[in-house]
Image (cartoon, rainbow, N blue to C red):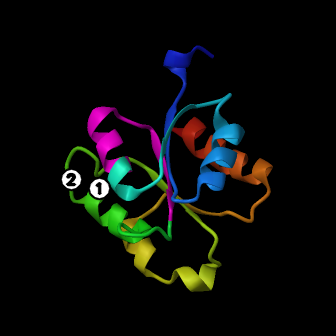
């Protein structure tokens, strides 16, 4: 697949190791942009459109839920699909994130193949 035909994923995570691991997992299949904060992610979104955002739930300053609230309230970004990426378990997440209607909740403890399968499954169904 040519670079221009690849779907574009924005990964937002404050953990540099997670950003690196996610990039390694997805870079051959997708065009990638990386942001180490919600603020940086908002700047990137203002410059170029993306097909999917992989969003860390727990980040300093702008948390995952706060970031979702911000992009959902902006007409330019409100329809961008978001998958939440978290180290928390289901019970620790609570209901707050669900009100922003993420496409999926992915757990950082998932095997890489499952993570890839869920992302591929969503993007290939679009």
The quadrant the N terminus occupies is top right
Asked whether, in this view, residue 116 is left or right of residue 100, the answer is right
Q: Residues within 10 Å of mark 2 (few under 14, many from 20)?
A: few
Height in image: 31 above or below 85? above
Along the line of sight, the residue nearer the viewer: 77 or 45 = 45
Q: Residue furthest top?
A: 2
Q: Residues within 10 Å of mark 1 (few under 14, many from 20)?
A: some
Label pair 1/2, CB-CB below 8 angstroms: yes
- Region rendered in magenta: 41-56
The residue labelled by disc 2 is 74
Asked which secondary structure carries label 2, the reply is loop
Q: Where, by quadrant of the figure, is residue 104 drawn?
A: bottom right
Asked whether, in this view, residue 59 is left or right of residue 6, the answer is left
Asked which secondary structure carries label 1, the reply is helix
Height in image: 71 above or below 32? below
Q: Which mark is residue 71?
A: 1
Q: Which mark is residue 113?
A: none
Query: For residue 29: magenta?
Result: no
Asked whether, in this view, residue 64 is left or right of residue 88, the answer is left
Residue 67 percent across, percent down from the top left: 35, 62
Residue, x 31% and y 49% (percent of image)? Answer: 42
Residue 118 percent across, percent down from the top left: 66, 50
Residue, x 58% and y 14% (percent of image)? Answer: 2
Query: For residue 44: magenta?
Result: yes
Residue, x 68% and y 28% (percent of image)? Answer: 28
Residue 71 percent across, percent down from the top left: 29, 55
């Amino acid at each position: 697949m040519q670079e221009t035909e690849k779907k574009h994923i924005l990964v937002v995570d404050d953990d540099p190791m997670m950003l690196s691991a996610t990039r390694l997992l997805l870079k051959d299949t997708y065009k990638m942009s990386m942001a180490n904060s919600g603020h940086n992610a908002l700047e990137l979104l203002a410059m170029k459109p993306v097909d999917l955002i992989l969003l860390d739930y727990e980040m300093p300053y702008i948390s995952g839920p706060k970031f979702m609230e911000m992009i959902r309230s902006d007409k330019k970004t409100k329809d961008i699909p978001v998958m939440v990426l978290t180290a928390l378990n289901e019970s620790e997440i609570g209901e707050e994130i669900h009100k922003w209607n993420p496409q999926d909740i992915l757990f950082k403890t998932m095997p890489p193949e499952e993570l890839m399968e869920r992302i591929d499954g969503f993007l290939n169904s679009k």
